[in-house]
Image (cartoon, rainbow, N blue to C red):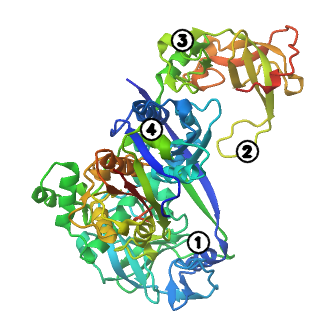
Amino acid sequence: MTRFIESTITFPYKRSLGPVVGAFMTALTEKQILGIRSGDAVLVPPMEWDPSTGAELAHEFVEVGPAGTVESWTWVTTPSEQHPLDHPFAFALVRLDGATTPLLHAVDAGTPGGVSEGMRVAPRWRGTRAGRIDDIICFVPGEVPETEGEDTGGAAEPVTRMDYLASITYRNPVPEAADRATEASREHRLLGLRCPACGRVYAGGRGLCPVDAIELGPECEVDLPHKGTITNFAIVTPVQYPGQTETEPFVRAFVLLDDTDVIIPYSAVIELPADQIRVGQRVDAVWASPAEETEEGGGMGGSWGSLLGWIPNGEPDLDDPDLVNRIF
Amino acid sequence: MSAPSTDIAVIGWAQSQMVRHTDKSETQLLMSAITDAITPLGLQRADIDFTCLGSCDYITGQAFSFVSNLDAIGAWPPKRDSHVEMDGAWALYEAWLRLQEGDIEIAVVTGSGRSSTGDPALIYPMEMDPYFLAPLGADPLTFAALQARAVIASGIADERRMAEVAVRARGTGNVESLLAEEFIRQPLRRHDVPPITDGAAAMVLATGDRARQLVERPAYITGFDHRTECHNPSFRALDDSPSTRIAAEAAGLAAAPVEVAELQAAFTHEELLLRSVLGLGDDVTVNASGGALKENPIMASGLCRVGYAADHIFGGGNRALAHSTSGPCLQQNLVCILEGRS
């Protein structure tokens, strides 16, 4: 049975709005809905360019609505976590009074029977508005706008930016070769896979030969030496982004294993400060002790499992000018 | 764009198993699809002069996921390679342009995706307009339902004809019982919407004499074009597809009749709309493969349409149309005309 792992990736976007969308969003905080004039038409939501010709539009805004007419609709029986309402509702194309084009939004109509083409709707505003399309919680039947909760008024400054948190959960299979490499690391073995076609050896649980494009099964496994030479390195000064756990500059080294053509990339180093690392330095593998073992393994993570990193072994440096070219 | 002076032909293609949920990585799917596409032609990976892969990082959940997909093409010694963040049908378009330079003879294009990795209903809204649509969670089913309502209102489709499309595509069920089902997004029922499919496809192209050496009956690409419309569906007439019409005109559809058409219609009403816009009569066999309603491997579904159209030519047919689409409510459309020669 293939093992699957689940991971959630979040992208906290900060979006610039520009002069047209920004004006629209700022107006929303004042409970006003703006369109933009394009010839005889009034486009809602406003665009910077005419959608049919691509011509830039003059910033001639027109207040529309607040009430409008449902032109088309569909019924959402099971709302998702991203939807504006947590109970069944209609997504509708609402043509606001004075607009030429319809706006997509939710209509809180109770049942599918409560929504129809031609019905009149008006916005239900959020009491506290940020300058986002969802300052309008939804539309409700009738001509009269509503405000939910205490009305804290419009924005003090023009709205120029919008936060959008994208968060996606993925479920991916773990290749068997990766699991076998991790298991071997628990016994402090560094597992490689030798391609039967070209003889190249791959480490890190990569279960295929990218040169010959064939899969490498357990019959291809070989044990790799625990000794090598630093070919190249980077000193990473961490930038604080969401999810970054490092705070101080740290080393990542590339290690060529003895008697092989295998590079262990982007490795942690131990007892080797950033100002003392050199190309050509000889190192030994360091494995997690049982006390350091976690479910995720020791230091390097992924299929490296219990491999913590590399420590200088005191042997004289190798003097080979080509070493520095080896990072793959 | 009409035919270039150099003959460029589809000479073979293959697809992985199409399943609801694969335990293979995208690279593994591609590895087998490419091998299965080139081996019957007597080709090896070293014979491929150019590759173009179509896939989507957003669906894979991995930045630069196409880089690991390169492992499937055997890119050593280094190869000419490209990638499109689109269906493999657009990778095919790029390869067709590249082969027109005349300095290379064989190209392989792929499309691959594992839709089951995440929940499409939650991922797709994030690809919509970031200001007005994504914050509402405006999902593909909603857009499809709104387009279906417009297509029904125009008389191009009705719920019964949509159910008939579903029965024909999947080869199961009957119209009466399907119409008795509840709506999942009115006016759409379960049978109107595509399955979630994991899979990959690979296609081999060759130029002129090389194509004729490798296969008896190449499927020559004689017209190829793609066009796009405004990104926000509320600015479009949803009962029409002008980009499809323009692409078909530019690809030369009107020059001669086609016997078959493979349309990337993931929803039943899309097939009826596309048939209408393309002016396909009852004498044209549409989506004999079952189309995207039967198997809908994201990022490969359009390339499979070209593959099935090519199969018609390989089997002795004269002229076939393949269509691919991208974006909500048929935003962007591609038309490829394939022909055989006696």
Q: Nearer the viewer, residue B35 or A79?
A: B35
Return the chain for callout 4.
Answer: B
> What amino acid is labelled 1 in the image?
Gly
Q: Callout 3 environment at 10 Å: few (<14), some (14 to 19), or many (20+)?
A: many
Residue at mark 3 to residue at mark 1: CA–CA distance? 58 Å
Mark on residue B213?
4
* Residue on which disc 3 sits: A221
Labels 4 and 2 touching (C-beta < 8 A): no
Left or right: residue B164 versus residue A215 is left
Give a yes or no on whether discs 3 and 1 share a subunit.
Answer: yes
Residue at mark 2 to residue at mark 1: CA–CA distance? 27 Å
Q: Nearer the viewer, residue A222 or B1?
A: B1
Q: Callout 4 environment at 10 Å: few (<14), some (14 to 19), or many (20+)?
A: few
**Vertical side of A75 occupied by B340: above or below:** above
**Vertical side of A163 occupied by A209: above or below:** above
- Judged from the image, the secondary structure of the residue bearing numbered disc 4 is helix
Displayed quadrant of residue B186: bottom left
* Residue on which disc 1 sits: A131
Return the chain for callout 3.
Answer: A
* Residue on which disc 2 sits: A240
Earlier sequence position, callout 3 versus callout 2: 3
Mark on residue A196?
none
> What amino acid is labelled 2 in the image?
Gln
**Vertical side of A188 occupied by A117: above or below:** below
- Judged from the image, the secondary structure of the residue bearing numbered disc 1 is loop
Labels 3 and 1 touching (C-beta < 8 A): no
Q: Callout 1 environment at 10 Å: few (<14), some (14 to 19), or many (20+)?
A: many
Residue for point 40% across, 39% down: B215
Give a yes or no on whether discs 1 and 4 share a subunit.
Answer: no
Q: Residue furthest bottom?
A: A40
Front tag of 4 and 2: 4
> What amino acid is labelled 4 in the image?
Gln
